[in-house]
Amino acid sequence: MCCVLNPTGSGMVAVMRITFVLFWLVVALLPVSVFAAEEPDVIDIGSRRELFVDTFLIESLDGAQRRLHHPVARNVVTVNDAPWEGAGSGYHSVIHDGDVYRMYYRGSALGVEAGKLKLGAQVYCYAESRDGKTWTKPHLGLFSHGGSKQNNIILTGLGCHNFAPFLDANPACRPDERFKALGGSAKEGGLFAFKSTDGIHWSLLQKEPVITVGAFDSQNLAFWDSAAQKYRAYFRTFTKGVTTAKQWTPDGYRAIRTAVSADFLSWGDEADLTYEDSPAEHLYTNQIGPYYRAPHILIGLPTRYVEHGWSESMRALPELQHREERADAHLRYGTALTEGLLMASRDGVHFDRWNEAFLRPGPQRPDTWNYGHQFIAWHAVETKSDLPGAANEISLYASEGAWTGHSNAMRRYTLRLDGFVSINAPWKGGELLTRPLKFDGRKLAINVSTSAVGSVRIEIQDPDGTPVPGFALNDCPELFGDSVDRTVLWEGGPDVSQLAGRAVRLRFVLKDADLYSFQMTE
């Protein structure tokens, strides 16, 4: 006992040592939350442009909502009425290549005539434009049709059912493979890989198909995914289908399957697409690709295919006689309807899909509300606005009139830059709070539209919700107007560089306004 009471004795030293060890053993067994709150996940957005086509960055919405926007109909850009084109023309792809817009599409004698399905040779055709609005079909002199080479045909034979070209963004791409494409059908053995230097003269990368198991009777496509640093392919499949090495037996819904590749020839990691809160539906095409202003986000514009059968509503739709003729050949040609959807993904497999239509059939008029209507061309491209002095806009192209007669057409539609989905608040106001994020850059730029009485203000917070001094809501004057690139100001100016690399939240307070995107810039 005396040893314990003696502060200078060896017994006291031993007790202190034992006490120290026991203390840290207890500490080690306690949960971390006893000492500090768990840090939330922080999303590093760098200097990327961020859209609201998905909910990835959204922590909460109060009085505001995500709003789906719809393309505005413009001019008919092409009429496919040449003998090698016809009412079965389809599967369009559009590429913006420098100062040239390139359009690729199938020409075919497919169609319905006198109540019977008309089949014929399929070729792939080419059109081009300098502005994305007015298009021409050059006489290329590459292939003969009807005894003449005065046509715009770029490909015949293998792959011509669904040839889908793209401009390869892979930095390691060889010059003679600047353009690539997939094309082919199950009857031909699968999907084949093509290459081109100029987008007009094409050849096979190898004789054998590169993807062999699938349905493929749709527009099957691939592209370089710069975010994942690999090629991605998306192709037709069927849910509940039975796969073997040599065949595909459909039994379910028309669906989409994906695969990845390092070299565009060897494909693997196949997976069926999954969707957030969406029903099983027939998706005819997929039209997936990196959104060019935010390539880490993949946006798809698939075609929804709906079988309705005959009803009084069906008979009230345009051109009943043509509808009955198509139904005589096959019921779906007369009573199925198609329209465009919108979906987005950050991993290439799981998509946020809007169940409401993105591109509806629209006002009833000739060549609409039928099977084959509103198939959106692959790739959205940027074009100048028809309004002098207004910002550029997105042009989309969609099919009109199909399967009856001797031609169909493509109509141009426009959308605001980044204008697929917005955070919308009414006159009474609403708020968006982001998840914790960190960024690079000096200024915050937003794509926004308000009314004359509407406004947007932005607060930068710490992850716990505390306003950062100098960037509180009261430090941000009301911002109003309609701009795709508006710099946000606080009382101290626009510079946010002191917060770069630090975990923060963004709080957007809106009134009668739409917020489409934001980006930290230099």
Image: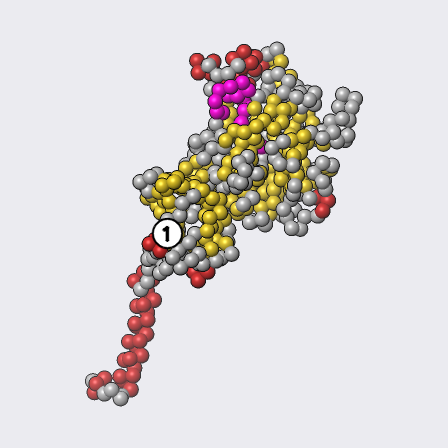
Q: Is residue 370 above or below residue 264?
A: above
Vertical position of residue 441 compared to residue 193: above or below: below
Figure coloring: secondary structure
Residue sitting at the far right: 147
Residue 228 rendering spot, x and y as whole percentages? 56, 49
Name the residue rendered at 47%, 13% in the picture: 315
Identify the main secondary structure in magenta: loop
Q: Assess whether residue 348 is covered by the magenta stretch.
A: no
Q: Which image quadrant for residue 448?
A: top left
Figure check: 7 above or below 440: below
Q: Which residue: 43% across, 41% down?
A: 449
Q: Amino acid at mark 1?
A: Pro
Q: Which residue is mark 1?
A: 477
Q: Splitting the image into 4 quarters, where does residue 333 fall?
A: top right
Q: Is residue 435 left or right of residue 330?
A: left
Q: Nearer the viewer, residue 239 or 484?
A: 484
Q: Which residues are magenta?
A: 361-377
Q: Position of residue 169 (x, y in %)?
A: 63, 46
Give the secondary structure at mark 1: loop
Q: Is residue 233 visible?
A: yes
